């Protein structure tokens, strides 16, 4: 059964304050990727997407609950959230337990590093609220638990976007006396989970490596071998995929490539590449991965494949050879 019967929701813009002081060190965190997916590369004026490129998607399960729909690269965030919610619902119909949603929040044509970290995180809070309103029906809201990176962000999220909502707001880590040195207080994830919980959403767990490790613990202890589902929302997982964190210094984080990532389905994804051979890597479940480029004011599909290509492969092989 679908989580929500509503295909769309009224999205009312809210006035949101800037995120508190946790993001003081975001300048270090938001070093932009280069062609290899690691550090800075030249900037260009990335254009908006055309709507005339479509793919037809249906539930991979092939059962009677499958819903066919046309997917266009989004022209704005309202359209993006509707696409992402439909893709997530199809993945839920196919019993996917661990899902990734990733897209730029500083603008649909932006890349990591274009926006200031605190502003991007604040924007993500509002986008998460709107996404949940589309995906989750009111009767399911109390069984949905949204985990923010730190305990002190829960109240901020409630004031910024979740006032009056029935979703359960929670946290992955707690600040410690040594927070400025990258240390946080250990939180046992099973203590945060309640028996009635059905769906978890981990909100942007990327500022501190302990946040993503807490997500892995949440999946292992409270999702795996249950009927629960977990969505990782804008977790910047490409940092882990691309080797941004050296395995020698971050062995537990690197181990996620073998333990957590193989179980994960990327249900919605947009990654832009800037420079002379710019383009966009796009996926909307259950469709294939596609690489687009603008040609004479239109976006055309240069390449598609079933498995996710690496950022390095797209930047150095697919885009230059097109």
Image: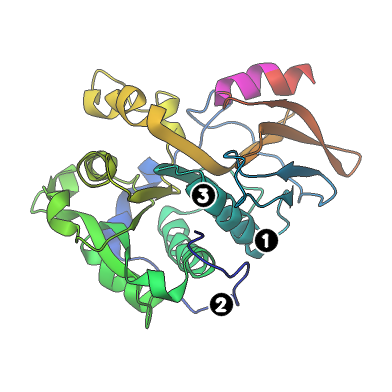
Image x and y of residue 8, in percent: 62, 69
The answer to which of 301 and 118 lies nearer the viewer is: 301
Report the magenta residues as a range: 310-317
The residue at 49%/59% (across/down) is 1
Report the quarter where the C terminus lies. Answer: top right
Q: Residue 146 placed where, x, y %?
A: 33, 61
- Mark 3: few/some/many CA within 10 Å (<14, 14-19, 20+): some
Q: Could you say whether the residue bearing mark 3 is in a helix, strand or loop? A: helix
314 in the magenta segment: yes
Crowding near pointer 1: few (<14 within 10 Å), some, many (20+)? some
Residue, disc 1: 79
Residue 66 is a magenta residue: no
The tag earlier along the polypeptide, 3 or 1, is 1
> For the residue labelled by badge 1, is the local secondary structure a helix, a strand or a loop?
helix
Q: On residue 93, which mark appears? A: 3
Chief secondary structure of the magenta portion: helix
Whole-Å distance between the Cαs marked 3 and 1?
21 Å
Residue at coordinates 45% horizontally, 25% vertically from top-left? 242
- 201, above or below 307, in the image: below
For the residues bearing labels 2 and 1, Cβ distance under 8 angstroms: no
How many tags in the picture?
3
**In the figure, residue 21 lies in which quadrant?**
bottom left
Can residue 10 be seen in the rendering of this structure? yes
Q: Which of 97 and 157 is in front in this view?
A: 97
Q: Name the residue under label 2.
A: 13
């Amino acid at each position: 059964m679908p989580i929500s019967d509503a295909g769309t929701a009224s999205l009312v813009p809210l006035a949101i304050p800037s995120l508190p002081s946790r993001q003081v060190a975001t300048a270090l965190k938001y070093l932009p990727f280069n062609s290899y997916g690691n550090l800075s590369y030249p900037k260009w004026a990335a254009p908006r997407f055309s709507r005339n490129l479509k793919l037809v998607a249906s539930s991979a399960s092939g059962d009677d609950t499958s819903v066919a729909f046309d997917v266009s690269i989004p022209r704005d965030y309202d359209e993006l959230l509707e696409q992402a919610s439909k893709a997530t619902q199809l993945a839920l119909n196919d019993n996917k337990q661990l899902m990734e949603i990733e897209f730029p929040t500083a603008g649909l044509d932006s890349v990591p590093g274009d926006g200031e970290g605190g502003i991007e995180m604040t924007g993500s809070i509002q986008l998460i609220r709107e996404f949940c309103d589309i995906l989750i029906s009111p009767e399911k809201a109390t069984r949905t638990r949204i985990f923010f990176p730190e305990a002190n962000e829960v109240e901020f999220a409630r004031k910024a976007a979740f006032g009056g909502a029935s979703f359960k707001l929670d946290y992955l880590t707690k600040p410690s006396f040594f927070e400025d040195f990258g240390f946080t207080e250990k939180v046992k994830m099973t203590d945060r989970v309640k028996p009635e919980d059905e769906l978890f959403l981990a909100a942007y767990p990327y500022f501190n490596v302990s946040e993503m490790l807490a997500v892995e613990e949440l999946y292992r202890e409270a999702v795996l071998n249950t009927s629960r589902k977990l969505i990782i929302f804008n977790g910047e997982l490409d940092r882990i995929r691309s080797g941004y964190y050296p395995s020698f210094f971050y062995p537990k984080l690197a181990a996620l490539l073998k333990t957590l990532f193989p179980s994960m389905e990327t249900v919605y994804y947009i990654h832009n590449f800037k420079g002379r051979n710019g383009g966009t890597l796009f996926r909307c479940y259950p469709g294939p991965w596609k690489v687009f480029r603008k040609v004479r004011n239109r976006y055309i599909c240069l390449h598609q494949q079933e498995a996710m290509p690496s950022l390095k492969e797209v930047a150095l092989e697919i885009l230059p050879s097109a």
